[in-house]
Amino acid sequence: MRDELKNLADVFFAKIVEPAYKINLSWVRRELMNLGIKDENIDHLYIINAPLSREVWYYVFVKLYEEKKLDSFLNLLLEKIGAINLGKLTENLDAVGLCYDGRFHLKTFNIVVLVSGRGTNLQAIIDAVESGEINGKIVAVISNKKGAYALKRAKKHGIDSIYLPAKKGEKREDYDKRLAEIIDEKKANLIVLAGFLRILSPWFVKKYENTIINIHPSLLPAFGGIYGLDVHRKALEYGVKVSGCTVHFVTENVDSGPIIVQKCVEVMDEDTPESLAERVLEKEHEALVEAIKLISEGRVKIEGRRVIVKR
Ligand code: GAR
């Protein structure tokens, strides 16, 4: 029960409270200190023995619920955990969320997709959103490359498509700040790199920690740090018998973040980089949709390097 409660706290904070209210932990910590953390409600935290971020979460929750007391909420939560429908718990919040099977689901899950090229992965996401497989909305597609076909795909589906070129001599971080402005304005819950051929600055990666995912056309950690056909060329040169794709969270080091989904394909003797790329690409589309679906349903938890998926 305790673990379940902690999990709910994790998901609730990461998926609902933080994105919706733009509250960050350092702000809350400061507020907590200002307030002396003497509130009797806060004592509950120690009973639950939650780590600091969860302590903070409960405090934020008290703030969100204002007049209602934390203990009554916690009792309600405890009572309801495991019940079929926990929607009532969130119906008073502006940050709309539904919860069932012990998981929170955002009613609106906003996805921003960053692209640089043809956008077949983007198309897979568009299709999955339109068919209802992913319960979310693509709020913007942003490209750093002018003629990117991905932008046309987005337009065709009525999605806001934005061309954001880097200025001459512009520092990486300055570009990323302009990018972040758009992303924040769109209230993104998830940033998907779908063939985005630009390395993001540490500033950007930190700002959107655990919120950016990338698709890479190899089974990482093999053949990371390179793009497109080069990846398949290297895989063939090395002589691997299986290759595939990886969807992972983006961290400061390129192609090194916690792995969410991997899919593999067999390598044939007669494969060329092009033929291998084609087979891997089919798997990419499946893997990316699967990863977005899992994240949007709050079923993904990062523990160190490992991503634990609640099935
Ligand atoms: C995809 O194969 C993706 O894995 C790769 O670029 C391609 C984009 O295709 N990304 C990388 O190599 C990143 N290191 P798409 O524009 O058709 O989705």
Image (cartoon, rainbow, N blue to C red):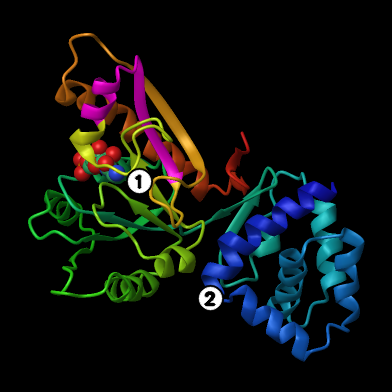
Left/right placement of residue 220 relative to residue 176 reads: right
The residue at 63%/38% (across/down) is 310
| Farthest-out residue, left | 147
Q: Earlier in the sequence, mark 1 or mark 2?
A: 2
Q: Residue at x 79, y 89 (%)?
A: 35
Q: Residues within 10 Å of mark 2 (few under 14, many from 20)?
A: few
Mark 2 residue element? loop
Q: Is residue 120 visible?
A: no
Q: Amino acid at mark 1?
A: Val
Task: Say the numbered circle drawn on residue 22.
Answer: 2
Q: Is residue 214 above or below residue 88?
A: above
234 within the magenta span: yes
Based on the picture, tell me whether residue 69 belongs to the magenta stretch: no
Q: At which x and y percent is residue 59?
A: 75, 75
- Mark 1 or 2: in front is 2
Categorize mark 1 by other alpha carbons within 10 Å: few (<14), some (14-19), many (20+).
some
Residue 54 falls left or right of residue 139:
right
Label 1 sits on residue? 129
Classify 287 as above or below 100.
above
- Residue extent of the magenta highlight: 232-248
Foreground: 277 or 225? 225
Check the picture and name the quadrant holding the C terminus. top right
| Residue 246 falls left or right of residue 20 | left
